[in-house]
Image (cartoon, rainbow, N blue to C red):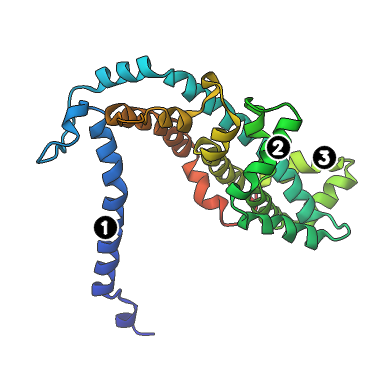
Amino acid sequence: MSVASKKPDLPVQFGVYISLLIVIVLTLVPFYWMIVGATLPQDQFFTYPPRFLPGTHFFENLADLRDRFPYLLSIWNSIFVATVYTVLSLFLCSLAGFAFAKYEFAYKEYLFYFILATVVLPVQIMIIPLFLLMANFGLLDTHIALILPFAANPVGIFLMRQSMKSIPDSWLDSARIDGASEFQLYYRIALPSVKPALAALAVILFLFQWNAFLYPLVVLTSEELFTIPLAIERLVGQHRLYFDQIMVATALAIIPITILFLLLQKYFVRGFAGTAYQP
């Protein structure tokens, strides 16, 4: 192959950069407008020409939000529910993924693909059965009702299974010879080997629970238990939209998610490679 043929096609490269720039702009503009809107009073949302520079009413909007709804309590509820759900789901998904990847049992493949097939089921068709199930167990209007039904996440089981399949069987056999129990194989060998996949899955699970709206809307009735999406929905009045407070609430809602992603971003891409850590 000649050297000339290895040179990048400049028009194609330019087109790729322009396309990426457009995607970046389309992605960041809504976030910028959210930040600007959080600093504007209600009457400046429909002025012409529109304002694109931040205002000075952020703390006033924050005070109005606090007076209208206990929003900080909703943030704490979301952090608590999403954290407990993520930890529990990571344990269950990694345990199931380890079993599917490293053990042989009857109908293993059929069971795995049956679990994987549930991914295509929309949450909406499961709301009524889950509501009745939670009612029978007396768990309605509790945070437990938000955590338990989705703890065994099929996407998480799939990701863990694919990651743990790349762990050499010789590692496990050597540990068995040294007297390790099966559970020790799981938490001393399997889990440390798939740290990037665990980090990536943690972000996915946390986001799933953090953004959940329809199911919590059905099972929660007490405002002191509301999560962030339900709190923001309360800012939509019957005859008026409180745009300034909605923008403040939304801006505050993305802070924990942003912090989580920044802490785990170096593992996020590696986590989807599906390979175990090789010392």
Question: Residue 278 — which label?
Answer: none
Q: Closer to the camera, 80 or 165?
A: 80
Q: Label 2, on which residue?
A: 132
Q: Relative to residue 96, is residue 109 depicted above or below? A: below
Amino acid carrying label 2: it is: Leu
Judge from the rendering whether residue 244 lies leftward or rightward of residue 235; answer left or right.
left
N-terminal label among 2 and 3: 2
N-terminal label among 2 and 1: 1
Q: Label 1, on which residue?
A: 22
Residue contact at pointers 2 and 1, CB within 8 angstroms: no
Residue contact at pointers 3 and 1, CB within 8 angstroms: no
Question: Residue 183 — which label?
Answer: 3
Judge from the rendering whether residue 16 lies leftward or rightward of residue 96; answer left or right.
left
Evaluate whether residue 139 shows in this view: yes
N-terminal label among 3 and 1: 1
Badge 2: residue crowd in 10 Å (few <14, some 14–19, many ≥20): few
Amino acid carrying label 1: it is: Ile
Q: Relative to residue 41, is residue 128 depicted above or below? A: below
C-alpha distance separating marks 2 and 3: 35 Å
Badge 1: residue crowd in 10 Å (few <14, some 14–19, many ≥20): few
Judge from the rendering whether residue 51 lies leftward or rightward of residue 97; answer left or right.
left
Q: Position of residue 195 (x, y in %)?
A: 62, 43
